[in-house]
Amino acid sequence: MAASTALILAGIGISSLLCQWFAWRVRMPAILFLLAGGIIAGPVLGFLQPAEVFGDLLFPVISLAVAIILFEGSLTLRYDEIKGHGKMVRNLVPVGSIVTCAIGTLAARWILEVSWEVALLFGAISVVTGPTVIAPLLRAVRPTAKLSNILRWEGIIIDPVGALLAVLVFEGILSWGQGNVFGHSLYIFGKTLVVGFIIGAIAGYLNGQALRKHWLPQYLHNAGTLTFMLGVYAISNEMAHESGLLTVTVMGIWMANMKRVPIDSILEFKESLSVLLISALFIILAARVEFSAILDLGWGLVAVLACLMFIARPISIFLSSIGTSLNLREKLYLSWIAPRGIVAAAVSALFAFQLERLGYDGAETLVPLVFMLIITTVTLQSLTARPIAKLLGVKEPPAHGFLILGANPIARLIGQALKKHEVPIMLSDTNWENVRQSRMENLPVYFGNPASEHAATHMDLTGIGNLLILSPYKQMNSLATYHFMDWFGDTSVFGLTEGDQDQKARLQTAGKVQRTRGIFDGVSYAKLASLVSQGYNVKTTQLSEEFSYQQFLEQYQQQALVLFTIDSKEHIYPVKDMESLEPEDDWVLISLVPPQPQKDRDANGNQGSEDKAED
C-alpha cells in the first residue's frame, strides 16, 4: 500500500509538471491541461482516487492550498493601482461583479433548479477571471494596448475581490444555516466578519513590520510568511468557524498596501509553490469530478454557461463603459474575453466539499458546473480570441518595441533615446537603486526577474517584441535569453558579447544563445560602461544629402558607436557590425558619441546641422 501511494503521489507531481510544460509550449493557460490531466487520471483511467489516497487529510490539504492561493492573490491588490488604471477598470470590478453574480445566481436557480445557497455561491464564484488565464491569452493574441491593459488589470484586481466576495457569500450561507432565527444567523455572520477582518489586519500589520524592520533574516522571509499565514488561518478558524479564508485574504491586502514592505520575493516564491502544490491540487480536484454529475446537468448546463458568456459579460461591459472612450468594436471584444481561472476552481471545490459535509441539497452540482465554466471559457476564448480580434480590427500591429534587461546608466540612456522616437520600451532590473533612478527619469521599469511568472502577469509588454540585454549579470542574462527566445523568437533577442576574460564561459554557452550575442559592433558591457564613464552620451542624428554617414563618422573622428538605425519606413534595428553598415541619406542613427571639446564644436561647420537633428 505504501509503495502504491508513493507511486500515485509521484505521478501527481510528474503529471502537474508535464501539464505546466505543455501549457508553456502551446502558450495556453495551464489550468486547462491540469484539469484535463486530473480527469484522465481519475474518472477515465481510475489511477487516482483522492478519497482513498488522502483519506481524512483530503479536506485539510484542499483548504490549506486554497488559503495559499487566496493569500497570494490578495498580495497583488494595491489601492493605488486600482485608482491609476482608468474609469473602465474601476467601473468593471464592482459593476461586473454585481451583474455576473446576479445573473449567474438566477440562471443556476431557475434553469438547473439548485438550492438558493448553491446558486448564490455559484454566482459569486463565476465572477473571478484571474491573471493566470488572461496573461497567456493576451500574449498570444496581442490586442491593442487599451484593451490589453483593461483585461490585464481586471484580472489582477478581480482575482482577490471575487474571491473575497465568494468567501463572504459562503460565510453568510453557513451563518444562516447555523442559526434558527434571523438574529442568531446575523450574529454568526457578524462574528465571522469581525474575526476575519480584525485578525487579518493584525496579522498583516505584524508580518509587514517583521519584513520591513528585518525581524527575520532574509532567507526566512518566504518560509516565515507562509507558515505564519497558515498559522493565522488555523487560529482564525478556531475562533470563528470557517473564517480563515477571509482572514488570510485581508492579511494579504493589508500587507500589499503597507509602505516599504518587500513582498516581491514572496510573490516569486509562490511560483515554485504553484508548480508543485497548486498544480497538484487541480489534478486532485479534477480527479474527483464524475462524468455522471456533468451529464445529470443536461442541457441546463449549456443554458447557464450561455447566460454568463452572452448575457452577463456583455451587460457588464456596456454598463461599465458608460462615460468612457471605448468604441463599439472594443466593447464587443471585451464582452467576449472573460476566461475563468484557478481561484474559481479551487474555491468551488473547497466550498462544495464543505456544503456536502453539511448536507446542503445540490452541493454536488457546484464543482462540475464551475469546472465546465472554466473549461468552456478557456477553450473557446483561447481558440477564437485571435480571429475575433482581427475581425473587429482591435489587434495590435507587429511589436517593434524593446524589453531592456538592465536599468543601469547605459540602459537608461538607450531607453531615453528609444522613447523619444516613440519606440515602446520596458526596462527590468533586480537592483532597486537602478529601478529608482529609472522611475525618477520617467522610464517604464519592472523591478524583478523578467522571466518570472509574476513578471508574465504584471509586466506590461504591449507593443514590445524584442529583448535587448544590457545587464552585467551573466546568469540572469542566460535565463532571460532562453525565456524570451521562446516568447519573442530567436531573431528578436539581442545581447552584448561577454568579453575576452570570459572566453571559457562563452565557449560553453549553447550555440542557440551564442547567436544572440554580438550587437553594437561586438562591444562588451564593460566597454560600454567605460565609455559612458568617460563622458560618452547617446545622440540621435538625422542623415541627409547635406550630412552623410561618412561626414557623421568624420565629425567624431571615427569614435562614434552606432547602436540603432531607423530607416525611412520607421523600422528600427540594432546594429551588429559597423563595417558593413551602409545607412541611406534619410535614415536616423542612434549612437554613442564621445564628448567634443568646445573649440572643436565651434570650429566644426557641420555641427550646427547635426544639432538641429539631435534630441
Image (tube, helix red, strand yellow):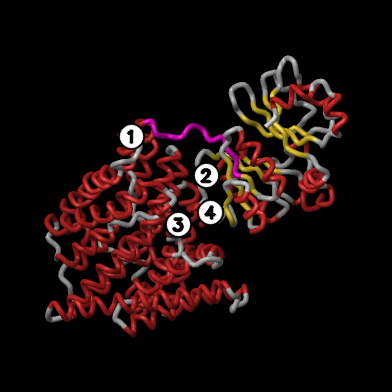
- 146 displayed left or right of 428: left
What is the span of residues highlighted in magenta in the rendered image?
Answer: 393-403
Quarter of the image that includes the C terminus: top right
Compute the Cα span from label 4 to label 2.
10 Å
Which disc number belongs to residue 80?
3
Asked if the residues shown at circle 4 and circle 1 are in contact, with their CB atoms under 8 angstroms apart, the answer is no
Q: Nearer the viewer, mark 4 or mark 1?
A: 1
| Residue 394 is inside the magenta segment | yes
Which disc number belongs to residue 461?
2
- 336 displayed left or right of 78: left
> As shown in the figure, which amino acid type bears the numbered disc 2?
Leu
Is 201 placed above or below 336 here? below
Asked if the residues shown at circle 3 and circle 4 are in contact, with their CB atoms under 8 angstroms apart, the answer is no
Q: Nearer the viewer, mark 3 or mark 4?
A: 3
Q: Residue 69 at what x, y percent from top left?
A: 41, 66
Which disc number belongs to residue 421?
none
Compute the Cα span from label 2 to label 3.
21 Å
Q: Earlier in the sequence, mark 3 or mark 1?
A: 3
Compute the Cα span from label 3 to label 4.
19 Å
Residue carrying label 1: 327
SS at badge 4: helix
Asked if the residues shown at circle 1 and circle 2 are in contact, with their CB atoms under 8 angstroms apart, the answer is no
> As shown in the figure, which amino acid type bears the numbered disc 4?
Ala
Point 50% across, 54% down: residue: 21
Residue carrying label 4: 455
